[in-house]
Image (cartoon, rainbow, N blue to C red):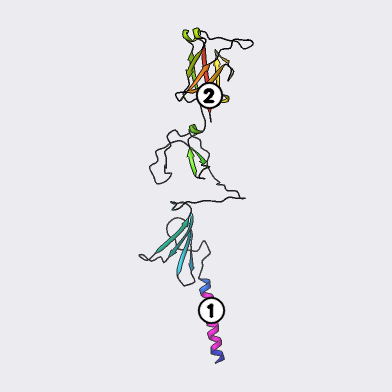
């Protein structure tokens, strides 16, 4: 009786060890590995209920239940895809970085569109844009370089009326009128003094330069017909 009991215990141990041995295949060169699309390896496993499954790595982890046609069930956890809810990554006290990003070597985009799809959609924009953070919502958005920094130039030739009145006013589209440190005005190649020789303002929402000739030394000057004025500005 004891011998029979011992035989049963040994048989159960052998069966258990056999099931453990076949529960998982870890040899990447095993020709018995099952694959289901993509180039990732598939590892055969058995869950705690005895169901045979296959785990495959292909930009994530794919769980495949059964490989028989018509009864195969595949569940994938992967990076990418469409977000179904607001998603946040908290990088507090840690570094969040993406390696392997290529340098942009083309022109900045001048035709980027809202919600343009990078993959699987009809892309209509060209060039590159900048990724920025919306501080109000924390949302990551894209920005055209021209909306971040731009520059321009306007030329103006004084007329006889300017000379007679010793005053001149002209407009410059796109000029940042609120900051004269970003605007330079030249008279016949000589730089004028901001806030003294000229002022900046908005006239009917149009950026305007008003010349202010000086009547006393050492910076006295007047407007003559055909004086050449240049406005150079940068906005960021």
How far is the residue under mark 1 from the one under mark 2? 85 Å
**Residue 187: which disc?**
none
Q: Is residue 210 visible?
A: yes
Q: Residue at x 45, y 69 (%)?
A: 52
**Residue 142 in magenta stretch:** no
- Residue 117 in picture, x, y percent from top left: 42, 44
Camera-near label (1 vs 2) is 2
Q: Residue furthest bottom?
A: 1
- Residue 33 in picture, x, y percent from top left: 47, 63
**Magenta span:** 5-18
- Mark 2: few/some/many CA within 10 Å (<14, 14-19, 20+): many
**Camera-nearest residue between 181 and 35:** 181
Q: Is residue 43 above or below residue 150?
A: below
- Mark 1: few/some/many CA within 10 Å (<14, 14-19, 20+): few
Residue 182, picture quadrant = top right
**Camera-nearest residue between 81 and 69:** 81
Q: Residue at x 53, y 89 (%)?
A: 4
- Residue 129 in picture, x, y percent from top left: 48, 37
Assign a secondary structure to mark 1: helix
Q: Is residue 93 above or below residue 70?
A: above
Q: Main secondary structure of the magenta part?
A: helix
- Residue 210 in picture, x, y percent from top left: 51, 17
Q: Residue at x 56, y 87 (%)?
A: 6
Q: Residue furthest right?
A: 218
User: Which residue is tagged 2?
Assistant: 233
Q: Is residue 12 above or below residue 233?
A: below
Q: Is residue 225 visible?
A: no
User: Which residue is tagged 1?
Assistant: 14
**Camera-nearest residue between 82 and 213:** 213
Assign a secondary structure to mark 2: strand
Q: Label 2 near label 1: C-beta < 8 Å? A: no
Q: Is residue 199 above or below residue 4?
A: above
């Amino acid at each position: 009786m004891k011998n029979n009991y011992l035989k049963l215990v040994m048989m159960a141990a052998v069966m258990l060890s056999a099931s453990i041995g076949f529960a998982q295949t870890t040899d990447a060169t095993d020709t018995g590995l099952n694959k289901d699309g993509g180039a990732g390896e598939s590892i055969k496993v058995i869950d705690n209920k005895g169901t045979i499954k296959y785990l495959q790595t292909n930009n994530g982890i794919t769980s495949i239940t059964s490989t028989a046609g018509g009864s195969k069930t595949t569940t994938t956890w992967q990076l990418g895809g469409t977000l179904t809810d607001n998603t946040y990554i908290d990088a507090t006290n840690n570094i969040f970085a993406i390696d392997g990003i290529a340098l942009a070597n083309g022109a900045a985009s001048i035709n980027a569109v809202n919600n343009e799809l990078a993959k699987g959609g009809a892309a209509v924009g060209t060039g590159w844009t900048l990724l920025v953070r919306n501080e109000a919502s924390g949302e990551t958005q894209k920005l055209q370089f021209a909306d971040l920094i731009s520059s321009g130039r306007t030329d103006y030739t004084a007329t006889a009326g300017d000379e007679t009145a010793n005053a001149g006013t002209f407009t410059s589209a796109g000029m940042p009128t609120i900051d004269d440190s970003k605007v330079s005005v030249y008279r016949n190649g000589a730089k004028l003094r901001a806030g003294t020789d000229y002022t900046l303002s908005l006239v009917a929402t149009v950026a305007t330069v008003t010349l202010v000739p000086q009547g006393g030394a050492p910076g006295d000057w007047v407007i003559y017909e055909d004086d050449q004025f240049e406005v150079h500005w940068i906005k960021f």
